[in-house]
Image (cartoon, helix red, strand yellow):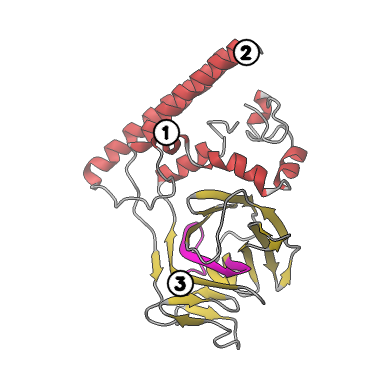
């Protein structure tokens, strides 16, 4: 298992504390890297099982199966998962002790085999009941989107079935939620399209924008993100993304907030991922700043995730199956 920053092996003892980085300074240094590096590693943000099947990890969980056989199935697959995970540990121990190319190849082959077994086990897991689902296609006005006190319309308007955001508004009904998937379809018409997550109110939230600035006659898309704490904005960070984004073209967006992880997907590709534990609950919303112009076709919020999805995320972030 290699450190995601320096690519050197992580000691077995240190893996009990941190399976992704060989030291705390390397974890901090890695978080400051550009989004290009994050994108290179972000390909692995999809679970191994989904990569093998070439499907999307972030599909909305299926409806709950019948309870009669569900409990027995859960016990069975959990047992198989435990066996598969134990197998990975045993195989890793039997493969350690040498640094030759042949041994490394055998270790990779063993890891791939166990990854497939774990993936198959996850696929058989029954889905848990879905949480709250909010959906808005903006056909009944903007009453579900709350502006800051005293700001009234705040620049928001509806044109030809499309939402054109202005000042920050938060989706009513989402403000007390914890883990969720925020999905929407939108386009950048001028400069940027902005959204927020984990917003309990208009003075506390995480904000991000997909920006397409013109530099030297060339468009270079980037993610701009910052936080607002008690009304005070943090320093803005700019991360170039190696994904082609065209103005005036609609793209599917998904922002996953799970625990302290925030992950952003545009057009089916991971473009940004980061961690921040200050807010564990709070809603979602849209905003536009001076010079920005964007439009949104629809928005959807899916609360929570199934146990299988949680296990996928656990595997994905290298706690069992390392990300190399």
Q: Is residue 287 left or right of residue 129?
A: right
Who is closer to the viewer here, 105 or 93? 105
* Residue at the front extreme of this rendering: 217
Identify whether 62 is placed above or below 283: above
Q: Secondary structure at mark 1?
A: helix
Mark before the other along the chain sequence, 1 or 3 = 1
Identify whether 101 is placed above or below 59: above
Of circles 1 and 3, which is in front? 1
Mark before the other along the chain sequence, 2 or 1 = 1
Residue 207 on image: x %, y %: 63, 65
Question: Splitting the image into 4 quarters, where does residue 198 fall?
Answer: bottom right
Specify the principal SS of the magenta part: strand
Residue at the spot of label 3: 173
Q: Secondary structure at mark 2?
A: helix
Residue at the spot of label 2: 101
Q: In this orientation, does residue 103 appear?
A: yes
Residue at the spot of label 1: 52
Report how far apart the C-alphas of labels 2 and 3 lie in the structure: 55 Å
Magenta-drawn segment: 172-195
Mark before the other along the chain sequence, 2 or 3 = 2
Residue at image coords 54%, 70%: 285
Q: Is residue 216 left or right of residue 148?
A: right
Residue 320 on image: x %, y %: 53, 31
Question: Splitting the image into 4 quarters, where does residue 304 fall?
Answer: bottom left
Of circles 2 and 3, which is in front? 2
């Amino acid at each position: 298992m290699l450190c995601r920053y320096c690519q050197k092996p992580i000691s077995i003892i240190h893996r009990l504390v941190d399976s992704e980085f060989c030291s705390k300074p390397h974890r901090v240094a890695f978080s400051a890297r550009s989004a290009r590096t994050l994108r290179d590693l972000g390909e692995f943000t999809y679970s191994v099982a989904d990569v093998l099947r070439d499907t999307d990890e972030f599909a909305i969980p299926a409806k709950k199966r019948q309870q009669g056989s569900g409990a027995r199935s859960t016990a069975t697959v959990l047992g198989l998962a435990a066996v598969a995970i134990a197998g990975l540990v045993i195989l890793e121990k039997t493969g350690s002790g040498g640094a030759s190319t042949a041994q490394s190849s055998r270790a990779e082959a063993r890891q791939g085999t166990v990854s497939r077994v774990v993936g198959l086990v996850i696929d058989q897991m029954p889905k848990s009941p879905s949480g709250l689902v909010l959906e808005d296609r903006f056909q009944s006005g903007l009453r579900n989107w709350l502006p800051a006190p005293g700001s009234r319309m705040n620049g928001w308007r509806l044109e030809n079935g499309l939402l054109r955001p202005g000042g920050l508004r938060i989706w009513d009904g989402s403000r007390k939620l914890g883990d969720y998937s925020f999905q929407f379809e939108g386009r950048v018409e001028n400069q940027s399209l902005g959204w927020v997550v984990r917003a309990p109110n208009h003075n506390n939230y995480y904000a991000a924008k997909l920006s397409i600035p013109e530099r030297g006659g060339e468009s270079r898309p980037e993610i701009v993100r910052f936080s607002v704490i008690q009304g005070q904005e943090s320093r803005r960070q700019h991360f170039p993304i190696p994904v082609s984004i065209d103005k005036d073209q609609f793209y599917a967006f998904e922002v996953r907030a799970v625990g302290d992880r925030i992950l952003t997907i545009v057009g089916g590709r991971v473009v940004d991922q980061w961690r921040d534990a200050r807010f564990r609950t709070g809603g979602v919303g849209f905003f536009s700043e001076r010079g920005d112009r964007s439009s949104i076709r629809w928005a959807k919020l899916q609360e929570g995730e199934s146990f299988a999805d949680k296990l996928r995320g656990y595997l994905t972030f290298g706690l069992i199956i390392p990300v190399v």
